[in-house]
Image: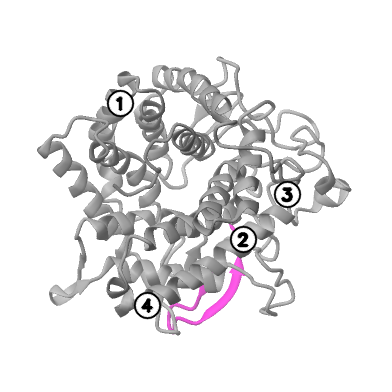
Amino acid sequence: MNINTSLTAEGLKQKAQRVFEASAVKIQSLEKSWNPAQGSPVFTVAGKYTSRGWTEWTQGFQFGAEILQFDATGEKRYLEAGRQHTVDIMAPHVSHIGVHDHGFNNVSTYGNLLRLMHEGRIEANTWERNFYELALKITGAVQASRWSRTSDGGGYIYSFNGPHSLFVDTIRSLRALAVSHRLGHALMGENDRKISLLGRLADHARATAKYSVYYGEGRDHYDVGGRTAHESVFNTNDGNYRCPNSQQGYSPFSTWTRGLAWAMLGFAEELEFLDTLTDADLEPFGGKAALAGIMRKAAEATCDFYIANTALDGIPYWDTGAPGMLRLEGWQDRVSDPFNHHEPIDSSAAAIGAQGLLRLGRYLKNSTYWQAGLTVCDSLFAEPYLSTDPNHQGLILHSVYHRPNGWDRMPDSDGVPRGESSMWGDYHAREAALYILRLAEGKPYLTFWS
């Protein structure tokens, strides 16, 4: 990546505002056309949002986008839409025992609404606040109940694949555990055993850092510092780690860049959360300094890898080891090309990773990460990534969902997906734009907790 050291949050304010100008049209279009009976919108096909049965993990991004739109613009119709959709449709996601994605669905909706209430952006109402808090307490406990133990004495929240499966994605969804813990909640187990949500957060973060992230320390033949594995597989009989795997990337031994981005943002955000806790809070779970050190090492490694393995403008291709990359000779020495004939870009990885770079840069007071995050946003918030076509329901173009399964639309004979959007890419672009706007305008720092 060619990091632009002259960029500032204030200098990107106009571009961030333009994101929300385009976003308004997209939200209204989807609201008019979407039938909730179809399930959650996931990604676009020929510019129209469609569903895809796998798990219901994107509904919170749909309605969370409305709440972020209000947050950025103050237009109350988006607040009312987000609030009503949360009440009418999101309850099944709170008690959903079959997914690990509680932070994605419920912190993006109930969590954003509670945050806005605590910030004084929406009128305080005791019953409404209690409603949001109850939902957030439950979602954290349900997420924590999906628990597998590891042979080293820790454990992890297992993915929808089953108890053997740790996904790198979940580190970003861990915000559900954090919020629920902050609200004083715990998971109650057999014989009324009280299970700490903070303890499970700490264990899952350690497991992700240990098994999902590489540090160039000789773990295997493909141990390149900072790369990530999408899935880590365990023997559920004894908790021993067995191997890396990949669901949506090219291989277990290459780096699926959206998984990399989830780790970048998840660890950076959880480091910020740790700063709200005391040494005493974390002493039973290994200590604050030790846990922060583990998270910082993972965050720095993944951010460094992103910077080193991304096109000049900060937008990554979907997998660093995909076979067509060999035909894109010199791709790291030029700006990203979503119209190439070999491998797709994944703009959603940029939308997620940008915020990870920004948050880690601010946390560490590190200008390299900070400026890298601004560089990614500068590219993402403009054409050919920002969609200004009112007939296209997506906000950020050239996102990829599941390349191995062939779920992405390939408009040309070269078989390369391009020109489409995803719920997670659009949501995280809005969140990154809001993050920048708040800094540029001197407003409260944006966190997932209140």
Q: Find residue 310 and name its label.
A: 3
Cα separation, mark 4 vs mark 3, equals 35 Å
Rendered image quadrant of residue 98: bottom left
Nearer to me, 422 or 75: 75
**Answer yes or no: do the residues labelled 4 and 1 have beta carbons within 8 Å?**
no
Cα separation, mark 3 vs mark 2, equals 12 Å
- Check if residue 234 falls in the magenta segment: yes
**Between marks 4 and 3 in the image, the one whose residue lies nearer the viewer:** 4
Nearer to me, 177 or 151: 177
Q: Label 2 is placed on what type of residue?
A: Thr
Q: Find residue 302 and name its label.
A: 2
Q: Residue at x 27, y 75 (%)?
A: 280
Q: Residue at x 37, y 50 (%)?
A: 103
Q: Say above or below: 104 vs 208.
A: above
Q: Label 1 is placed on what type of residue?
A: Leu
Q: SS at mark 2?
A: helix
Nearer to me, 325 or 428: 428
* Percent x, y of residue 95: 26, 51
Q: Residue at x 70, y 61 (%)?
A: 254
Rendered image quadrant of residue 377: top right
- Check if residue 267 falls in the magenta segment: no
Residue labelled with disc 1: 79
Report the span colored magenta.
232-247
Residue labelled with disc 4: 287
